[in-house]
């Protein structure tokens, strides 16, 4: 079964662009994938244009060989742009293979280990009484794992100030109150979106009673192993990190040193199924559970569901908190995963089990978009 074409679709969906990839074959079977490099979709589309020059005509079922060729075919290997392009194609090839063999993708990964995928939910409210009320409501709704954000998300049309010292003081106060109303059984964590320094993170964690947080996600940038080693000596809160990583080589130092306690892998950025399964196996050797990042379209969700179904070491899958149930989802995506009893059911349909109505994709709907810009009180830029 030969690859005949690879098509890319970059278009605005809700509040951001998505980048979908379709792999077509000479047997009429096609597969869908998605790139997760938000804000740089055009760069990924350009990389895929390079890849398709040598992928067309090759056997679509030789997924691992094609992955290696895509990764090693240039002198400058790796990087987030190329990894995101490889991820989308790899996911689409697994969709093709599943449809060809008439089995769901999870079967290609060794079979499913669970019928439903546990999820964690996110409260994006700013800290205050409403935040505490919201997490209490989420607990009443049956959610067993809840994540908070900083409550300060910035705007795309203007630069805003993020004062880390004020933020950690406020967050520590209200997370402590949230723990009081949640009790000890509910998982509670926070995503700091790599906005803090080592000292600020330590100061934040030390402002709360031990046991307040079950995890802190991305408090600092992931690239510095030494910084996380330093931070580990200062705090006793488990780390949820890894969504910035784009390969097993990125994950390896953090896994080998057991600094990652929950691996926040993004299957649409970390090499697709082929690479993500290797990363999960590596994490399993250190008793690290996977906690996949899932902020994109229903294609990413469907792929993540199959991935989670096949894993032994899974904590929870993210349910995107920002876009909600967009009406256009049902216009564009058929058989998309939907939340039921705070879980995703694992589809038994061939391939990913999801399809895309190409005629419903908005024409010329790509919008150049930049993430919000945040500055420190002194006017210098900080991480969003």
Image (cartoon, rainbow, N blue to C red):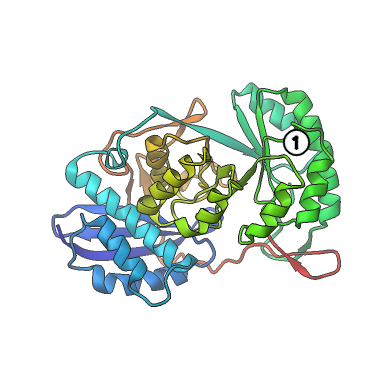
Label 1 element class: helix
- The quarter of the picture where residue 352 lies is top left
Q: Nearer the viewer, residue 347 or 273?
A: 273
Residue 146, relative to residue 193: is it above or below? above
Q: Is residue 186 left or right of residue 8?
A: right
Q: Residue furthest bottom?
A: 75
Residue 269 seen anywhere in this rendered image of the structure: no
Q: Which residue is label 1 attached to?
A: 131
Instruction: From the top left corner, tell me how far across and down residue 185 is, in percent.
Output: 66, 22
Instruction: From the top left corner, tell me how far across and down residue 156 is, in percent.
Output: 66, 63
Instruction: From the top left corner, tell me how far across and down residue 72 is, in percent.
Output: 34, 70
Instruction: Point out the image quarter for the N terminus.
Output: bottom left
Q: Is residue 327 left or right of residue 204?
A: left
* Label 1 packing within 10 angstroms: few (<14), some (14-19), many (20+): many
Q: What residue lies at 57% left-to-right and 35% top-to-bottom?
A: 120
Residue 168, relative to residue 310: is it above or below? below
Residue 182 seen anywhere in this rendered image of the structure: yes
Q: Nearer the viewer, residue 130 or 93?
A: 93
User: In the rendered picture of this protein, how many numbered marks are placed on residues?
Assistant: 1
Q: What residue lies at 37% left-to-right and 46% top-to-bottom?
A: 333
Instruction: From the top left corner, tell me how far across and down residue 94 is, in percent.
Output: 29, 50
Residue 146, relative to residue 276: is it above or below? above
- The quarter of the picture where residue 67 lies is bottom left
Q: Nearer the viewer, residue 152 or 194?
A: 194
């Amino acid at each position: 079964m030969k690859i005949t074409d690879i098509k890319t679709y970059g278009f605005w969906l809700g509040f951001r662009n998505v980048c979908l990839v379709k792999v077509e074959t000479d047997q009429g079977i096609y597969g869908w994938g998605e790139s997760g490099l938000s804000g740089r979709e055009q760069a990924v589309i350009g990389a895929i244009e390079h890849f398709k020059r040598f992928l067309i005509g090759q056997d679509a079922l030789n997924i691992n060989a094609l992955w290696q060729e895509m990764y090693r075919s240039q002198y400058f290997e790796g990087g987030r742009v190329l990894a995101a392009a490889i991820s989308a194609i790899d996911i689409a090839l697994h969709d093709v293979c599943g449809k060809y063999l008439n089995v769901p993708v999870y079967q290609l990964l060794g079979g499913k280990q669970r019928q439903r995928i546990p999820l964690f939910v996110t409260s994006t409210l700013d800290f205050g009484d409403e935040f505490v009320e919201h997490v209490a409501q989420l607990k009443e709704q049956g959610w067993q794992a809840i994540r908070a954000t900083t409550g300060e998300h910035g705007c795309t049309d203007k630069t805003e100030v993020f004062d880390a010292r004020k933020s950690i003081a406020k967050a520590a106060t209200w997370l402590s109150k949230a723990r009081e109303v949640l009790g000890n059984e509910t998982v509670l964590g926070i995503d700091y979106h790599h906005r803090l320094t080592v000292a600020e993170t330590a100061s934040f964690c030390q402002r709360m009673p031990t046991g307040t947080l079950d995890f802190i996600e991305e408090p600092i940038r992931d690239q510095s192993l030494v910084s996380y080693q330093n931070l580990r000596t200062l705090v006793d809160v488990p780390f949820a990190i890894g969504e910035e990583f784009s390969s097993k080589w990125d994950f390896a130092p953090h896994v080998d040193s057991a600094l990652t306690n929950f691996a926040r892998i993004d299957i649409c950025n970390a090499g697709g199924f082929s690479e993500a399964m290797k990363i999960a196996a590596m994490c399993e050797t250190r008793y690290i559970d996977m906690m996949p990042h899932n902020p994109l379209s229903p294609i990413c969700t469907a792929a993540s569901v199959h991935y989670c179904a096949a894993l032994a070491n899974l904590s929870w899958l993210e349910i995107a908190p920002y876009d909600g149930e967009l009406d256009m989802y049902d216009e564009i995506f058929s058989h998309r995963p939907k939340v039921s009893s705070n879980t995703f059911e694992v589809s038994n349909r061939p391939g990913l089990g999801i399809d895309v109505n190409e005629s419903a994709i908005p024409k010329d709907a790509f919008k150049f978009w930049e993430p919000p810009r945040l500055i420190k009180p002194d006017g210098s830029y900080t991480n969003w």
